[in-house]
Image (cartoon, rainbow, N blue to C red):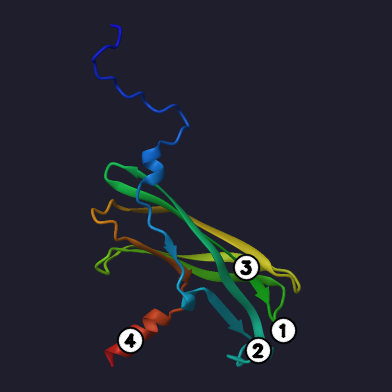
């Protein structure tokens, strides 16, 4: 009655408050590989010629947030960057193939999704983009070995795999 010697029950968190355990819980960082951080598009027949560059896109920032529910890790993975028109560029909409992948420590892909991010170019001004994938849901790992990758899907990994077969 007076609170002597008895164990106190923890108070439930107030609505909208973040618990310390949530702040310190495991949430794997997002890795943007250098080879997948930029993508270039050239005018027809101008591959590799700087004078025929239509546009270049780059990812400059990445972040994530995590929450847990019924044994699952729910993530919101976001990447931001910009598209810069090149000498052969024209106004219009470009499509950026942005891929988000979650890998387990043993190399097993638990989640992969490619998005076609639309960016409208007008004249010679660079345009920023932001992509947020709020649908990443994977089992909570016992050993905290998840890796989250984000970058442009340039098809090089598929090409590399097919080259390794021959």
Q: Badge 1: few (under 14), some or many (20 or more) residues near its Cα, within 10 Å?
A: some
Q: Residue at horizontal 28%, vertical 63%?
A: 104
Q: Badge 3: few (under 14), some or many (20 or more) residues near its Cα, within 10 Å?
A: some
Q: Badge 2: few (under 14), some or many (20 or more) residues near its Cα, within 10 Å?
A: few
- The answer to whether residue 46 is left or right of residue 29 is right
Q: CA distance from mark 3 to mark 2?
A: 18 Å
Mark 1: which secondary structure? loop
Residue ID for mark 2: 50
Q: CA distance from mark 4 to mark 2?
A: 29 Å
Q: Earlier in the sequence, mark 3 or mark 4?
A: 3
143, above or below 36, in the image: above
Q: Earlier in the sequence, mark 1 or mark 2?
A: 2
Q: CA distance from mark 4 to mark 1?
A: 33 Å
User: Which numbered dot is residue 162?
Assistant: 4
Mark 1 or 3, which is nearer the eye? 3
Q: CA distance from mark 1 to mark 3?
A: 16 Å
20, above or below 98, in the image: above
- Residue 53's spot in the image, x, y percent? 65, 85
Q: CA distance from mark 3 to mark 4?
A: 31 Å
Asked whether 11 or 139 is in front, the reply is: 11
- Residue 81's spot in the image, x, y percent? 59, 66
Q: Earlier in the sequence, mark 4 or mark 1?
A: 1
- Residue 112's spot in the image, x, y percent? 37, 64
Residue ID for mark 3: 82
- The answer to whether residue 51 is left or right of residue 66 is right
Q: Residue at horizontal 55%, vertical 77%?
A: 39
């Amino acid at each position: 009655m007076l609170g002597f010697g008895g164990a106190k029950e923890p108070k439930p968190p107030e609505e909208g408050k973040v618990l310390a355990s949530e702040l310190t819980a495991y949430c794997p960082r997002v890795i943007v590989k250098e080879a997948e951080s930029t993508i270039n598009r050239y005018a027809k027949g101008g591959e590799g010629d700087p004078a025929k560059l239509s546009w270049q896109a780059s990812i400059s920032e990445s972040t994530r947030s995590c929450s847990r529910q019924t044994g699952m890790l729910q993530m919101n993975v976001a990447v931001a960057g910009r598209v810069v028109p090149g000498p052969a560029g024209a106004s219009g909409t470009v499509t950026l193939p942005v891929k988000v992948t979650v890998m387990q420590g043993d190399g097993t892909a638990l989640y992969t999704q490619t998005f076609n991010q639309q960016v409208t170019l007008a004249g010679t001004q660079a345009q920023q983009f932001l992509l947020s994938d709020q649908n990443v849901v994977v089992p909570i790992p016992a050993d905290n070995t998840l890796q989250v990758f984000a970058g442009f899907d340039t098809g090089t990994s598929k090409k590399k795999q097919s080259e390794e077969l021959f």
